Amino acid sequence: MEFCSKCGGMLLVEGDKAPACAKCGYKFKGKLKIQSSEKIAVPDRIAVVDESKLNTYPIIEIKCPSCKQKEAYFWTMQTRSSDESETKFYKCVKCEHTWRTYR
Ligand SMILES: [Zn+2]
Ligand SMILES: [Zn+2]
């Protein structure tokens, strides 16, 4: 079962469609599973959390290295040219620790 990161309501997932919140109606971008279709180009060395967008990021199961919480927001960013691998970002839902991984 997945829950809305905005209001905590239950998410309705229908087949391949983007999940939507049953309570507030908020539609999530893409699927909840890890995917990398959403690429955001950012200038070099800038890799910060866009707080206004955080609520649109899916929450995935991953262990926070800081507090051991098992859920974190997930998003990806293309840091430089498109030939470079994208960077995966995670932000703990509990302690807000943010970390990243390179492929
Ligand atoms: Zn909601
Ligand atoms: Zn944490």
Image (cartoon, rainbow, N blue to C red):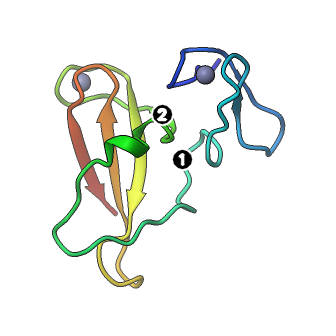
Q: Which residue is mark 2?
A: 60
Pointer 2 local density, CA inside 10 Å: few below 14, some 14–19, many at least 20:
many
Foreground of the two, 19 or 53: 53
Amino acid under disc 1:
Ile
Vertical relation: 61 (above or below) 88: above
In percent of width and height, residue 49 lies at: 28, 47
Circle 1 is placed at which residue position?
34
Q: Are the residues tagged 1 and 2 within 8 Å (C-beta)? A: yes
Tell me the element at label 2: strand
On residue 12, which mark appears? Answer: none
Disc 1, SS: loop
Residue depicted at 38% across the width and 31% down the height: 72
In the image, residue 69 sits, relative to residue 45, either above or below, namely above
**Quarter for ligand 2?**
top left
Q: Who comes first in sequence, dot 1 or dot 2?
A: 1
Identified at 16% across, 69% down, the residue is 45
**Where in the figure is residue 88, as x and y percent of width and height?**
36, 54
The crowding category of the residue bearing disc 1, from other C-alpha atoms within 10 Å (few below 14, some 14 to 19, many at least 20), is some
Image quadrant where residue 32 sits: top right
Which residue is at a point 47% across and 66% down the rendered structure image? 39
